[in-house]
Image (spheres, helix red, strand yellow):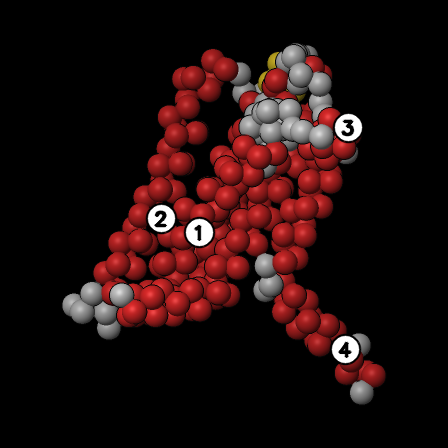
Amino acid sequence: MMNNFFSPERNDNRLKTVLRQPWPYFFAAFACTVLESAKSFDRLAQVPFFRHGEWLISDAFHTDYKWIYYTAPKILIGVVGGTFLVIFLASLSGRYRLQLQVWSKPSALIACSVILVPLAVSVLTCICGVHSPVDMLPYGGKYPHIGLLEQLWEHGSTAGGRSFPAGHASGGFALMALYYLPLRELWKRFLFILGFFAGWGMGLYQMARGEHFLSHTLTSMFLALGIIILLERHFDGLRQRLKALAGKK
């Protein structure tokens, strides 16, 4: 019995069970909030993006190529979310219900993730009030580098910025919900990795402009994972409640 308890296979199954819960990712997001207040971590990670008083991606470059590196990914994510919303709505109609039945839940989950993940991060960004690196004194700005927890501890309020967590990257991370499409496991993993790299690609672009620290993007990633898994685990219950409310009316 003791051998079974400590067997690698059993421990691996336990780890997988834990990682299918949303709370480990929300806890990791909170840990990143603590990390954000440890300023040396973010400053060290920011070194490759800020050299000789200049950001790796200049304002001029961003102005010229914003449409492809900043705007286009956001539009593409919106198109993906809108497409799966249409698929979900089509699955509710009598004409396509049977053909799209297996796509109904994952399509709704992806559409909700694309909407709710950036929305949740955007709300937190407004509440946390952390300034962007480019606005901070160590990088030529006018505000001191003070983390969220340090602001609350010393001043009892936030600084009024809008940089933490990383809002732009959250849209890319929302695409990790593509994992739940009814496809083969290999394709599911590929789509998850696609969302992972989409989020980090968008996040690194903003870091190279001085808009975010590494901890900002890490927090968005873990929040996205937590929200996606929370939606997936409770989607059936929410749908039943909505149907019950519609029936009462």
Residue 67 is at least partly visible in this image: yes
> Which residue is nearer to you in this view: 15 or 88?
88
Dot 2 and dot 1 residues touching (CB under 8 Å): yes
Q: Is 2 drawn above or below residue 133 in the view shown?
A: below
Q: Nearer the viewer, mark 4 or mark 2?
A: 2
**Distance between the alpha carbons at the discs numbered 3 and 1:** 36 Å
Pointer 1 local density, CA inside 10 Å: few below 14, some 14–19, many at least 20: many
Secondary structure at badge 1 equals helix
Identify the residue under disc 4. 7
Place of residue 78 in the rendered image (x, y in percent of width and height, measured from the top left): 35, 42
Q: Amino acid at mark 3?
A: Glu
Q: What kind of residue is marked 1?
A: Ser
In front of the other: label 3 or label 4?
3
**Tag shown at residue 96:** none
Badge 3 local density, few (<14 within 10 Å), some, or many (20+)? Answer: few
Q: Earlier in the sequence, mark 2 or mark 1?
A: 2
Label 3 and label 4: CA atoms lie apart by 48 Å
Q: Secondary structure at mark 3?
A: helix
Mark 1 vs mark 4, CA separation in Å? 36 Å
Q: Considering the image in quadrants, where does the N terminus appear?
A: bottom right
User: In the image, residue 98 lies at what x, y percent?
Assistant: 24, 73
Secondary structure under the numbered disc 2 in the rendered image? helix
Which label lies toward us, 2 or 3? Answer: 3
Residue where numbered disc 1 is placed: 113
Q: CA distance from mark 2 to mark 3?
A: 41 Å
Q: Earlier in the sequence, mark 1 or mark 4?
A: 4
For residue 57, which quarter of the picture? top right
Q: Which residue is mark 3?
A: 154
What residue is rendered at 30% in x and 59% in y? 88
Residue assigned mark 2? 81
